[in-house]
Image: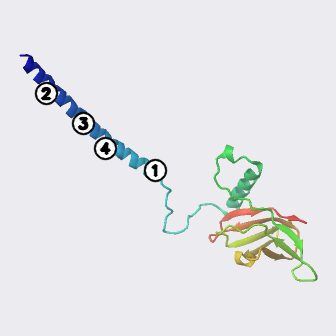
């Protein structure tokens, strides 16, 4: 009789161990599914290969947003607003007199390379005038100007979307 009870206990133990092993396998499978889902969510999202991102905004709205981001960057409020765009403000370009009697009379010197996506440089003058130049004309870091009354410099990408701006100073 004692032997029969021990045998039943062993059979019960074996059944419990089998249940534990089945439960463990089930948890491992569930953990693997969760791990794969977490990895998938942490992967960087791929850009849509159908073309450039379309922004439903007027150029004036984009410029206002760019100016806000630049001002926010200067004031150091990135942590409060949560904006992740880092390069909205380029280092201040310098306005220089063109040496000698060369034309144009002024030069805009960019002290840092332009962002890679820059296609057009727009110079806004204090009188409201604009000057447009392809980014490849600034390859040497200088852009010729007819006036030194520059309000700001705006950089556009290939979709004419403002990507950065700079407020120049004169030496």
Q: Earlier in the sequence, mark 2 or mark 1?
A: 2
Alpha carbons under labels 4 and 1: distance apart: 19 Å
Q: Which residue position holds label 4?
A: 29
Vertical side of 108 occupied by 83: above or below: above
**Residue 54 drawn at (x, y percent):** 56, 64
* SS at circle 3: helix
- Labelled pair 3, 4 in contact (Cβ < 8 Å): no
48 with respect to 104 (left or right): left
Q: Quadrant of residue 17?
A: top left
Q: Alpha carbon of mark 3 to alpha carbon of mark 1: how far?
A: 30 Å
Name the mark on residue 11.
2
Structural crowding at the residue carrying mark 2, measured as other residues with C-alpha within 10 Å and reported as few (<14), some (14–19) or many (≥20): few
Residue sitting farthest toward the bottom: 102
Which of disc 1 and disc 4 is earlier in sequence? Answer: 4
Q: Secondary structure at mark 1?
A: helix
Label 4, secondary structure: give it: helix
The crowd level at tag 1 (other Cα within 10 Å; few <14, some 14-19, many 20+) is few
**Horizontal side, residue 135 vs residue 50: left or right:** right
Q: For marks 2 and 1, give the CA distance.
A: 45 Å
Residue 147 percent location from the top left of the image: 88, 73
Gap between marks 3 and 2 measured at Cα: 15 Å
Task: Provide the residue designation for mark 1.
Answer: 41
In the rendered structure, are the residues bearing label 3 and label 1 in contact, judged by CB atoms less than 8 Å apart?
Answer: no
Q: Earlier in the sequence, mark 3 or mark 2?
A: 2
Decide which of tag 3 and tag 4 comes sooner along the chain. 3
């Amino acid at each position: 009789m004692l032997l029969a009870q021990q045998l039943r206990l062993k059979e019960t133990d074996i059944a419990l161990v089998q249940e534990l092993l089945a439960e463990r396998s089930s948890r491992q499978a569930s953990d693997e599914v969760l791990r794969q889902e977490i990895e998938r969510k942490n992967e960087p999202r791929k850009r849509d290969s159908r073309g450039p991102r379309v922004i439903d905004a007027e150029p004036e709205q984009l410029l206002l947003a760019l100016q806000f981001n630049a001002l926010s960057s200067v004031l150091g409020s990135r942590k409060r607003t949560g904006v992740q765009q880092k390069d909205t403000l380029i280092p201040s370009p310098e306005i220089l007199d063109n040496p000698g009697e060369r034309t144009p009379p002024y030069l805009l010197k960019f002290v840092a390379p332009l962002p890679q996506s820059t296609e057009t440089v727009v110079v806004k003058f204090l009188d409201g005038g604009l000057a447009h130049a392809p980014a490849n004309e600034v390859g040497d870091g200088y852009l010729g100007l007819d006036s030194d009354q520059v309000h700001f410099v705006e950089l556009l990408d290939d979709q004419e979307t403002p990507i950065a701006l700079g407020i120049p100073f004169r030496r």
